[in-house]
Amino acid sequence: MNVAAVEWLPQSASSVSFHKQYSYTAYEFTITEEDFLVWLDEKTPIEIDEPVEMLRYNFIIEYFPTPENTKTISSGLYWQTPPRGNGGGTSIAFDRNTGIAYFQSNPR
């Protein structure tokens, strides 16, 4: 789904694309780096020094990585929950080159 804004993201977030369900939630949106850091609240991101691959909101359609449903970020910020043995977790990234934030989570 693509919308201009949603109530569960900061007011400054725009051009929101998302897929939300219990087993897979992912969204991406345009935001400034400053507002992205405020949105992260108490999470402390790391500087991306090696490319990070994020699964996008449309990954659930095909279930395997393609150029259309993944995004490789080489400059920006990254945060993730500690790795879980069952594959679940949350990853959040900000791409400085595009000004787009990416969020992906599954509960497993």
Image (cartoon, helix red, strand yellow):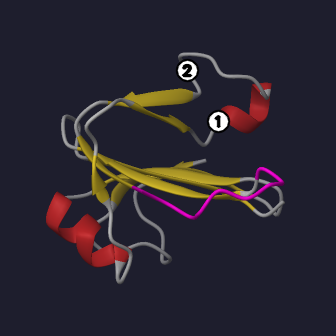
**Percent of width and height locating residue 91:** 53, 55
Q: Which residue is drawn at 75% across and 53% down?
A: 24
Q: Relative to residue 17, is residue 65 depicted above or below?
A: above
Q: Residue at x 21, y 70 (%)?
A: 35
Q: Mark 2 points at which residue?
A: 68
Specify which label sits upstream in the sequence, 2 or 1: 1
Which residue is outermost to the bottom?
42
97 or 77: nearer the viewer: 77
The amino acid on which the numbered mark 2 sits, given as a three-letter code, is Glu
Q: In this view, does 56 lie to the left or right of 74?
A: right
Q: Is residue 16 visible?
A: no
Q: Which residue is drawn at 33% across and 57% down?
A: 14
**Percent of width and height locating residue 96:** 19, 42
**Percent of width and height locating residue 93:** 39, 51
Residue numbers of the magenta segment? 79-87
Q: Is residue 29 visible?
A: yes
Please identify the dominant SS of the magenta region: loop
Q: Name the residue under label 1.
A: 58
Q: In this view, does 55 lie to the left or right of 63?
A: left
Q: In this view, does 48 lie to the left or right of 52?
A: left
